[in-house]
Image: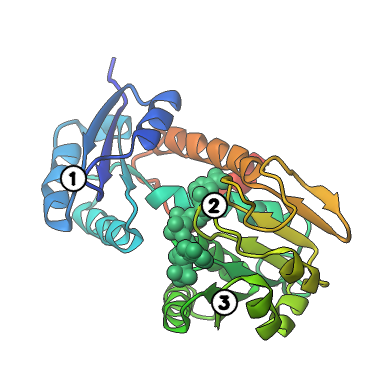
Amino acid sequence: MTKRILIQLDCDPQPSTFDAVVAVDAGAEVLLRHGGVTTEQAVSLVHGAIFTRGVDALSNTAIFLGGGDVAAVEALAATVRRTFFGPMRVGVLVDPSGANTTAAAAVIAAGRHLPVAPGGKPPTTALVLGATGPVGQRVARLLASRGASVHVASRSLPRAEEAAAQVRAVVPDARCEPVEWSGGVQAAAAVARLVERADLVVAAGRAGVTMLDGPGRALATSAKVFIDLNAVPPAGIDGILPTDKARRDGSAVVYGALAVGGLKMRIHRAAIARIFERADVFLDAEELLALGESLV
Ligand SMILES: NC(=O)c1ccc[n+]([C@@H]2O[C@H](COP(=O)([O-])OP(=O)(O)OC[C@H]3O[C@@H](n4cnc5c(N)ncnc54)[C@H](OP(=O)(O)O)[C@@H]3O)[C@@H](O)[C@H]2O)c1
């Protein structure tokens, strides 16, 4: 019996234990874990994956690309794609810092209440706080790819501009604008119009940081959905509990990190199963969103 082997290529020095545990729980029988992987090393690691088993057995080998540096993981993903040729390929899942699976789950949650689909009318107006981090970047990209008008917020305008440029690089027709956001009511007042107009507010700031406080949240009078991805107290958005799942709170519905995390885990496990189904499967953010949508 050919065993299902998952080759974990992580750009961090220590490959993620979280990703390893999920892989085993999702059906990987053997894990080969590599940390500190560079694009140069990736070529020979991929050759090891594609040249050892016959073409018919390659669906029993798969690659997981992870790590905290999104740009480094994207470079690894590009190298892996380039190294494959013809039928010499294996299934691949790309999920730096869990950002792709988490963002997919958040966008699916938003889409239950707002038109988050290409051509959705009227287009959703979204404000992503902490949009320069791995998760926020992907939330912004997926929302933009689904036709939303997205404001990406950072404490630094140049970083917000960079995040917006990255979205536009992948989604050329993206409506994505940078905004400087320091958090708290003072900053909220400075960008009050943006907050007031947002249908959707997603907090993707660092764990344990309040991105939208009470007075700031009170300004968000148009918001129909708030999603807080932070599970570590205090709340990322005032008044949202990690367990909130489509809880009606005033005129909006709210989602907390654990509710989004439950769907994220389903997507992650389904993705591991999917990359062992066919050798030509390559799951990045957009494919994971589609996979998640097929689950719910
Ligand atoms: N629910 C789930 O399943 C799940 C899964 C993964 C992650 N998460 C959560 O998702 C959130 C985002 O994760 P991540 O890895 O992308 O986060 P991150 O990289 O640690 O932080 C995201 C952004 O937060 C901003 N930030 C950092 N410190 C701040 C402060 N003191 N005040 C205001 N902003 C600050 C930074 O943006 P600027 O410096 O540009 O302002 C940073 O780029 C975290 O809360 C994480 O725990 C949830």
Q: Helix or strand or loop: what does disc 1 sit on? A: helix
Is 171 located above or below residue 158 in the figure?
above
Asked if residue 233 shows in the view, the reply is yes
Type of residue at label 3? Trp
| Mark in the foreground, 1 or 3 | 3
Q: Helix or strand or loop: what does disc 2 sit on? A: loop
Q: Earlier in the sequence, mark 2 or mark 1?
A: 1
Location of the C terminus by quadrant is top right
CA gap, disc 2 to disc 3? 17 Å
Q: Which residue is mark 1?
A: 46
Q: Which residue is mark 3?
A: 181
The residue drawn where x is 49% and y is 57% is 206
Callout 2 touching callout 1 (CB < 8 Å)? no
Percent across and percent down for residue 116 are: 69, 64
Percent across and percent down for residue 152 are: 55, 74
The residue drawn where x is 22% and y is 51% is 84
Type of residue at label 2? Gly
Type of residue at label 1? Val
Tell me which colouring the rendered structure shows: rainbow
Q: Which residue is mark 2?
A: 208
Asked if the beta carbon under badge 3 is closer than 8 A to the nearest atom of ligand 1, the reply is: yes
Asked if the beta carbon under badge 2 is closer than 8 A to the nearest atom of ligand 1, the reply is: yes
- Identify which residue, 170 or 81, lies in the foreground: 170
